[in-house]
Image (tube, rainbow, N blue to C red):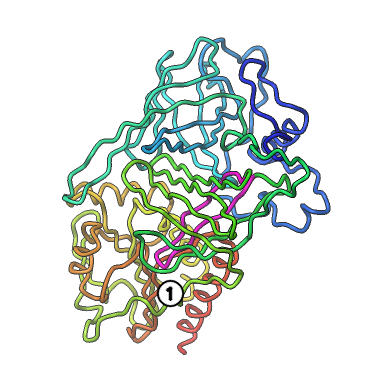
Amino acid sequence: MVGEAHGLYDRGMNKLPTLTSCVSALLVALLLGFAPAASAQAEQLPQPEEMDVTGEPPPRQVQNDENTVDWGPRKGIWRGEIELPDAKVLSFNFVVRFYRDEQKLPFWDIWLRNGVETLPAKLENNNPSYTITFPNTDARIEATINSTNTGLGGEYIYTRANSEGENVEYRLPFSAQVSDTRRFEWIESEDSDEDAEPAKLAERWSVTFDRRKGPAVAELQTLPDGINVYGTVMTPTGDDGHLAGTFQNGRLRLSRFTGGSGLLYDGTLEADGTLIGTFRSLAHHAEGFTASPDGDAALPNLFELTKWNDGIELADLSFSDTQGQEVNLSEIAPQGSPRLIYVMGTWCHNCADATRYLTSVYEQYHDQGLEIVGLAFESPKEFEEQALAVEKYIQSKEVPFQILVAGNRNKAEATERLGALDKVAAYPTVVFVDAAGNITGVHQGFVGPAAPTRHAQLRSEFTDRIESMLAGQ
């Protein structure tokens, strides 16, 4: 069976059986951006190097004896684990790299990896204690290193507002081990029938949650090794981003860790072909899910879920820029120019995907007259902190269009503050306004490149509407 064929990791010997070594080599190549030779099976599947990567580490510098040190975390691939309630473990991979600056002083950087997604983090080295921080979030890891510089242990710390709007600090146990390229620990098979055909994972699933409302669709891709899985789960409000994990002996585990957020799906394939398990968002949210294979599973039309309120004109809506100056939405574009009103938040990962996409849209169509304005609904309650978050966001993501400070992220408050939509049901939401100022469409949510087929469809729908507005149709 799979678990027996691939064996269990022997920390004492730091070795794996031959077949597992091959799988590990494949993962090392994927994580570091090198493509292995494609087999006939691999050629039929979209490979990670062909997918949309949201950021790559800088080119690896050549290391030599002159720029090595005998302290600090070892460079290479690590596997981190964050312990969650109910004995669940959020497992993820990261790459540690070592450099020397112009003064020959050593420094390290860290890149989180979620399948093909690459995200930067910063390591502060106060050997033997270390702090890992993540851009645009207050979350952090505080850890100490072991005597061989191969293991870290400590806490992952983040804050989350409760239902009363008060920030609650969570401290979760964290550990990490170098030279462990797997996403999750291997599962040893309990089935004695070595000739049994291993279960296969369907590519498309219809998903229901215990608490989240509305339909959900999972798109999953099993890599040629038959164990490692990439994919995402889509809902009418967005998607979970790049999930990565394993499917072994009937158990599916998928995770995504961005530094500021962490998701974990842990499910078991039942005899009838359904997946039943638990979804966790770090320590503050948990619910059950059930998934059934469904090649026709699809989201509803996201242009039909949120409506613009009759009688509301753009001239009725004004919001402050980051300097506190009021800006009327009727004045954000020259007379006769179409525009997009982008309801978003700097804290929102679906908005990060949408911002990246809308930046490309702006660069392509701005010279033809298209304008885009963002309305940011933020976590802090005070305007000054909201404005600071927006300024940092614009700078870090090099956003070419204006983003105004709209208010607090609470959806009920945002609906009241905006006043133009029947509800703010999702961040992001994009409103299409033609040259005459008429609302031609409202798109709820955003499915990003983690679901390449649905993302391509969304881009096509947006392009058609934008070009029609520019043509005056």
Main secondary-structure element of the magenta-colored stretch: strand
The reply, left or right, for residue 236 in relation to residue 460 is left
Dot 1 amino acid type: Leu
Task: From this view, report whether residue 257 is shown above or below residue 420.
Answer: above
Q: Residue at (21%, 57%) from the top-left corner? A: 408
* Up/down of 228 relative to 434, above or below: above
Residue 467 screen position, x and y as percent = 51, 80
Q: Position of residue 121 (x, y in %)?
A: 46, 35
Q: Residues within 10 Å of mark 1 (few under 14, many from 20)?
A: some
Asked which quadrant contains residue 249, the reply is top right
- Front-most of 223 and 132? 223
Q: Residue under circle 1?
A: 302
Can you give x and y, in whole percent of width and height, for residue 374 in the image?
33, 63
- Judging depth in this view, the residue of 445 and 346 nearest the camera is 445
User: Which is nearer the eye, 195 or 332?
Assistant: 195
Residue lying at 43% horizontally and 52% vertically, measured from the top left: 398
Considering the image in quadrants, where does the N terminus appear?
A: top right
Instruction: Report helix, strand or loop for mark 1.
Output: loop
Q: Is residue 144 left or right of residue 377?
A: right
Return the x and y of residue 331 as percentages of the image width and height. 27, 74
User: Which residue reaches farthest right?
Assistant: 40
Could you say which quadrant of the image residue 350 lies in?
Answer: bottom left
Residue segment shown in magenta: 228-247
Q: Is residue 230 magenta?
A: yes
Looking at the image, which residue is at 52% across and 75% down? 463
